[in-house]
Amino acid sequence: MTDTIFGQIARGEMEADIVYEDDLAVAFRDLNPQAPVHVLVIPRESMVDLNDAPEVEAATLGHLLQVCATVAKQEGLAEDGYRVVANTGDNGGQTVNHLHLHVLGGRAMLWPPG
Ligand code: AMP
């Protein structure tokens, strides 16, 4: 498994602006925010992207969505709404090969995405 900057954040080896963490997941602010609130939710366990999902504990994947909801509530996004995105592979625009969910909010999102 290739190590990544997110793996280093998950192991506490690299600084990040962490807004939530527990045994399974870490959530931190994106360095290059695309919305007033832009948080990344990652599993501590190393997995490249959603293509790995069938081999991963379903509870871990479900937990990541629960963390997105916790972060959204914490950041005051729950009432007005927000977007959760998992860019996957080249066509998905993924640039870091450690599964991450983007939680974006604080403005109205456009559809379709670019
Ligand atoms: P993606 O393009 O879906 O792979 O998203 C990767 C995201 O990680 C981008 O939005 C980057 O701005 C963000 N990013 C890269 N390095 C860091 C970092 N060290 N801390 C926080 N966010 C980062």
Image (cartoon, rainbow, N blue to C red):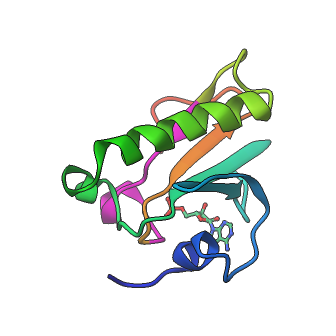
Asked if residue 106 can be seen in this view, the reply is: no
In the rendered image of this protein, does residue 2 appear above or below residue 65?
below
Where on the picture, by quarter, is residue 104?
top right
How many marks on residues?
Answer: 0
Quadrant (top left, top right, bottom left, bottom right) of the N terminus: bottom left
Q: Point out the stretch of residues depicted in magenta.
A: 83-96
- Hey, which residue is sitting farthest left in the picture? 54
- Name the spot of residue 93 as percent of width and height, x first: 42, 60
Ligand 1 falls in quadrant: bottom right
- Name the spot of residue 63 as percent of width and height, x first: 47, 40
In the rendered image of this protein, does residue 68 appear above or below residue 78?
below
Query: On the rendered structure, is 75 left or right of 46?
Result: right
Where on the picture, by quarter, is residue 14?
bottom right
Q: Nearer the viewer, residue 34 or 49?
A: 49
Query: On the rendered structure, is 35 left or right of 110?
Result: right
Query: On the rendered structure, is 100 left or right of 55?
Result: right
Query: Residue 95 magenta-drawn?
Result: yes
- Name the spot of residue 68 as percent of width and height, x first: 58, 38
Asked if residue 17 can be seen in this view, the reply is: yes
